[in-house]
Image: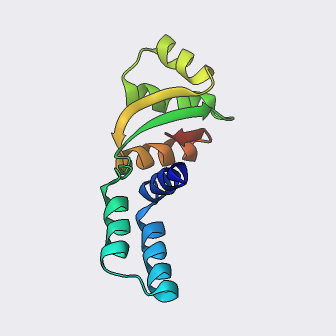
Amino acid sequence: MATDIKALGDQIVALTLLEAKALADYLKETHGIEAAAGGAVVMAAAAAPAEEAKTEFDVILVECGAKKMDVLKAVRAITGLGLKEAKDLVEKANSVVKEAMPKADAEKLKKELEDLGAKVALK
C-alpha cells in the first residue's frame, strides 16, 4: 500500500498545470473535494519547473538549392566568411550559418535564404 501512495504522489507531482487543474476540477465535481486537496494538487504542479521558452535560434542551411551562387553570396554577406569558407559551408549539408540569434532575426534570415531557393531550418 505504501508503494502505491508513493507512486500516486510521484504522478501528481509530475502533472502539468493544466492536468492538475483538470484533476482538481474532477475531484471537486465527482467527489466534492476542494480547497485543501485540490489546492495542494495545483500547488504541487505549480512547484514543478516549467520549460522555458526558447529565445535564441540557430539558422541551419539544410540544402543550398538550384541557385548555389546566389546562396553563396548571401552566406558570405551574412557571415563575413571568405570565399572558400563560405563555399565549404554552403556545400556541406546541415551547416550552421548563424548561431544564437533572436527569433525575429533568425526568421528574417531564413526567409532571405529561402527566397534564394535554399532549404533552411531553425533550431
Quadrant of the rendered image containing residue 80: top left
Q: Residue at x 40, y 65 (%)?
A: 17
Residue 118 lies, with reference to residue 84, above or below; the image says below
Residue situated furthest right in the rendering: 66
Q: Residue at x 42, y 73 (%)?
A: 21
Quadrant of the rendered image containing residue 65: top right
Q: Nearer the viewer, residue 4 or 91?
A: 4
| Residue 36 image position (x, y, % from top left) | 30, 75
| Residue 26 image position (x, y, % from top left) | 50, 80
Asked whether, in this view, residue 41 is left or right of residue 117, the answer is left
Residue 53 lies, with reference to residue 71, above or below; the image says below
Total numbered badges shown on the rendered structure: 0
User: Which of the colour schemes (rainbow, by chain, secondary structure, one colour) is used?
Assistant: rainbow
Quadrant, the N terminus: bottom right
Q: Nearer the viewer, residue 5 or 119?
A: 5
Asked whether, in this view, residue 89 is left or right of residue 47, the answer is right
Residue situated furthest top in the rendering: 84
Q: Residue at x 37, y 51 (%)?
A: 53
Residue 120 lies, with reference to residue 103, above or below; the image says above
| Residue 7 image position (x, y, % from top left) | 52, 51
Asked whether, in this view, residue 100 is left or right of residue 117, the answer is left
Residue situated furthest front in the rendering: 1
Q: Nearer the viewer, residue 61 or 122?
A: 122
| Residue 15 image position (x, y, % from top left) | 46, 59
Q: Nearer the viewer, residue 44 or 8?
A: 8
Q: Residue at x 48, y 13 (%)?
A: 85
